[in-house]
Amino acid sequence: MSTENRASLLRIATAGSVDDGKSTLVGRLLHDTKNILVDQLDAIERVSQSRGLDAADLALLTDGLRAEREQGITIDVAYRYFATPARSFILADCPGHVQYTRNTVTGASTADALIVLVDITHGIMEQTRRHLAVGALLGVPHLIVAVNKIDLLPDAEEAFRELSGQLHELADDLGVLDLRIIPVSALRGDNVVEASQDTPWYDGPSLLSWLENLPDSSELTQAERFALPVQCVIRPQAAALSPEFVDYRGYAGQIASGSVAVGDKVAVQPAGRTTTVERIDVAGAPAEYAVAGQSVTLTLADQIDITRGDLIAEPAGAPSGTKSVEAVVCWLDDEKPLREGQRVLLKHTTRVVRGIVGSLDGRLNLESLAAESVESFELNDIGRVTVRVAEPLFTTAYTQSHALGSFLLIDPQSGRTQAAGMVQDDSVNTPGVLGNLRADAGEWAI
């Protein structure tokens, strides 16, 4: 493992069915890596003793809301930071209940790795399918299935191997490209931080060891084509204070992908013009070079009419505008279903445009992994839609760029976020059943 990788930050999320042990696993990670303060551990031990438990309930480390502690469930996404000598981590512990799937979408949307827990005594549940589908849909680079509670079975090896075969088959159907399956006991700590001697039939690394050696997504994002959605135009009001700012017109935003250097050629959309980067400012100071994730201000060699929501991108392969967006969405609104003809606001990068749902093209049946025709999408449904918008959007397929291929649907009356969407492009080969989700006599059109 390189020095650069050891110093990197990995964002991980946990998901799984109710009572599969997600919060206990996270607590075990924090406890066994010595990332718990003494007073925290003392408080957890006191609460555990009051409940008649013999040992500290490590799940209490992440179930921070009072309702969570009282009910013994996870409701909200709990974010925790911890570090080892190898690297740093930001972990999102996501809820398991089906009504909180939208929280899982939020937690997994920025993750480099998603850990899905499966209770070995229960096997693959509907939520297992849903969470793996969400991970595949969001393009999470690494999916890890932690098969938990292996200490409850006298012959865990046979059960683990059978379950592993089923999980690999499901992952193949969903188009998951990187799946790792690890047998663990979150309660005892087997194969969580240290490899367990009680599983001689498993010769792979522990969960933490695997996480420490995963690459993060920053290098992949920086390797993509340069794209900067413009957030605002900067014209200094105190230009008289410095002659260099008299004619200053900067275009500020966060670089969504790729990198840019002074002197690079860029294309501006929707103006359709090509120009040159004249100056880059990062944190108020000039820079010769900037990469994805940095907030920058660019000045260009030519005077071009640019406003918020416009796109500055690498000329080769710069997206062209479209007023029809085909996408897979996860419906997150528990108050209103999605129907054809419904008016929405679509937020793509820094632009918000009016839109109307043209068609519902198929919903994913999580049990059969088949597409089915429906008249509406309800809470937590995953399916394909076509949205017509009032102004051109400069999108790419989600598999090519997460930044330019993702969007939100918003209720124009309440401002409530209703769906997370991923742009699909049938000319781009996307593996798995989520690639071309269309209802056609109840079968996948692949």
Image (spheres, rainbow, N blue to C red):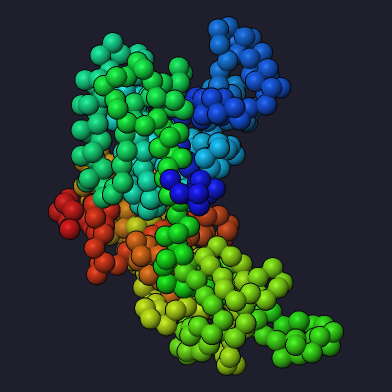
Query: Can you give x and y, in whole percent of width and height, for residue 331 in the image?
Result: 42, 51
- Quadrant (top left, top right, bottom left, bottom right) of the N terminus: top left
- Position of 443 with respect to 343 (left or right) is left
Residue at coordinates 55% horizontally, 36% vertically from top-left?
84
Horizontally, residue 315 falls left or right of residue 294, namely: left
Residue 423, image x and y in percent?
37, 64
Q: Position of residue 161 (x, y in %)?
A: 22, 26
Q: Is residue 20 above or below residue 263?
A: above
Residue at the location (85% across, 84% down)? Answer: 241
* Residue 251 location, quadrant: bottom right
Q: Residue furthest right?
A: 241
How many numbered marks have been drawn onto this rendered protein structure?
0
Query: Residue 427 appears at what percent x and percent y?
Result: 24, 70
Name which quarter of the figure residue 160 lies in.
top left
| Quarter where residue 439 is shown | bottom left
Residues 134 and 389: in front is 134
Q: Is residue 420 above or below residue 352?
A: above
Q: Nearer the viewer, residue 355 or 209?
A: 209
Q: Is residue 136 left or right of residue 417?
A: left
User: Can residue 23 be spotted in the picture?
Assistant: no
Residue at 45% of width from left, 17% of height from top?
188
Which residue is painted at 21% across and 20% down in the image?
Answer: 158
Relative to 59, 105 lies left or right? left
Please determine whether, in this image, residue 121 is positioned above or below residue 402: above
Up the image or down, 159 lies above or below 74; here it is: above
